[in-house]
Image (cartoon, coloured by chain):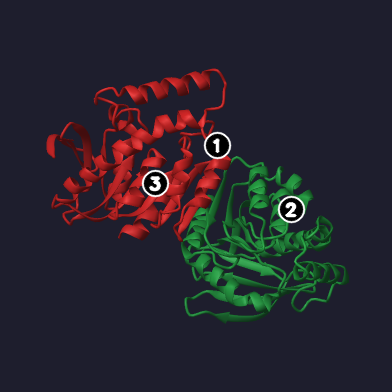
Chain colours: A red, B green
Amino acid sequence: MRFTSERRLDDGVLEREFTLGEIPGTLWTPESAAPAPLILLGHPPLGLRRMHPRLVARARHAAADGFATATIELPGSGDRPRWDAVEQARAALRRAVEAGEPVSEEIIDALVLPLVDKAVPEWQAALDALLALPEIGGPVGYSGGVISIGIRLAVVEPRIAAAVFFAGSLVPRAMFEEARHVTVPLHVLLQWDDEGNDRQAALDLFDAFGTKEKTLQANMGGHTGVPQFAGDAAAQFFTRHLK
Amino acid sequence: MRFTSERRLDDGVLEREFTLGEIPGTLWTPESAAPAPLILLGHPPLGLRRMHPRLVARARHAAADGFATATIELPGSGDRPRWDAVEQARAALRRAVEAGEPVSEEIIDALVLPLVDKAVPEWQAALDALLALPEIGGPVGYSGGVISIGIRLAVVEPRIAAAVFFAGSLVPRAMFEEARHVTVPLHVLLQWDDEGNDRQAALDLFDAFGTKEKTLQANMGGHTGVPQFAGDAAAQFFTRHLK
C-alpha cells in the first residue's frame, strides 16, 4: 500500500489516495489521535472519480462519528483496465433496459458474479493493508455499494462486524443462498420507489439474511433519494455495533 | 377534564391521572417549564392498568426528549363499561384463533371499525382538553396502539402533525382506503416475525399511505420484541417533526 497524495479537508478529515498494487483507493481519517474503527465504503461500479462527491460526504459524516473510512476502485471501473466480460454484460443490460425488456437472470449473473469473485479478495487485501496502519483499529464495518459484494464479504471475511446494505442493485439468485450465511448485524436501506430495483426481490433478500439482528429501513423516493435522516440512522447503527 | 391523582416519578416526570367525562386517562409532563409538544400514546385494548408499565416507559423516554405524553382508556376496556358488540367480536376472534382458522374480514371489521368510530372523537375531545393546559403546546404526535385508530385520527384531526404506527394489528380493508388520505409524516414499525400479524398486509398498508414522507422500519422478532434502538429511532422521528 502506497500513499500517493494527501489533503486536509476543512473539517480536519485527512484524505489520502493510495494504490494497492494496481488498485487505486482512498482513505479518510478523523482528526482524533486514537486508532479509529474502520468503515469500508462500497460504491456502484461508476469509477471512484465520479463517485468522489458522494464518497467524501459519507466519509465526513463517518469521521464526525469517529470512524475512519476507506474505499478501493472496483475491477473494470474508473482508471482500472477495461474488463471485457463485464463490459459485455453491461452492454446487454443497457440493451434490455432500452428495449423495455425484463433483465434476465443470465444478464444479472454475468454482470455481478464475476465482479463479486474478483472484488472481494481485493477488499480483503485492502483490509490487511489498512488494519496494519497505526491510525486504524478494529472492528470493521462495510457500507453500501454493490450489495452482492457486501454479502460475500460479510460471509467470508470474519473481520467485518456489521454492515449497512443498500437494496438498490441487481442481485443474482445465487446471492440469496449466500445471504442465509450472513450472521453479522445488518441495517438494510430500501428506497421504496426505486425505479431500478425490484421491491419484492429486495424484501425477499432481507428475509433471506441469516442474521438474528437485521433492520430494514424503507424510505420514499427513487434510487438516489435516500433522505438525510436515513443516513443518520445508518451511522447510529455503526456506532452501536463498532464502538 | 378533572385530575384525580398526581405523583412525581424519580426522573422528575409528573404523572397525573384524569377523567374526561367518564373516560379515565393519564398525562405525563417533563420537568421543564416551557410548554411541551404532546405525543398521544396509543395502546391495544387491554386496559390502561395492565398497559401501565409499558406506557410509563414510553412516557419517560418521551419526557427525556422534552415531550409531554397522554393517553385515554379505549371504549369497552379497563374500568370502562363492557361493550357487547366488541365483546362478541373478541369472542369470535378467539374462537377463530383457537380453531386455527383464518380470521375473516367480517370478524376484523366487527372488532375494529366500531372501536375506531367511537374512540377517535374521544381522542379528539382529549386533545381539546389537553391543549387547553398551559404546560402543553403544539404540535401533536400520535404513537402506537391500534393502527386503525391512528389512521383515522391522522386523517380527520388536523392537529396531528406526525405519527408513529406499529404494524401489529388486524386492519379492516376499509382502512387501506383511509390510509391513502394520510398526509402527515409517518414512521411505521414492523416486527418481521410478528405471529399475530400478516407481513404482506403490513407492507401493503405501508404502500397505501398517501403521505410523501413515510419510513418503514422492520426489525426481527415477534409482536412485543421491538428492540430498544427502534424506540430510539421513533423518538428521533418525533424530535425531527414536532420540535
Question: What residue type is disc 2 on?
Answer: Arg
Query: Residue B122: image x %, image y %?
Result: 77, 63
Left or right of residue A182: residue B90: right
* Mark 3 crowd level (few <14, some 14–19, many ≥20, 10 Å Cα): many
Give a yes or no on whether discs 1 and 3 share a subunit: yes
User: Is residue B77 or residue B194 the one in the foreground?
Assistant: B194
Asked if A104 appears above or below A66 in the picture, the reply is: above
Residue found 48% across the figure and 36% down from its top: A225
Mark 2 lies on a secondary structure that is: helix
Determine the CA span between mark 3 and mark 2: 41 Å
Report if residue A192 is visible in the image: no
Residue for badge 3: A151
Determine the CA span between mark 1 and mark 3: 18 Å
Choose top left, top right, bottom left or bottom right for residue B110: bottom right
Question: What residue type is disc 3 on?
Answer: Ile
Question: What residue type is disc 1 on?
Answer: Asp
Which disc is residue A198 wearing?
Answer: 1
Left or right of residue A132: residue B128: right
Choose top left, top right, bottom left or bottom right for residue A23: top left
Query: Residue A183: image x %, image y %?
Result: 40, 57
Quarter of the image with the N terminus of chain A in it: top left
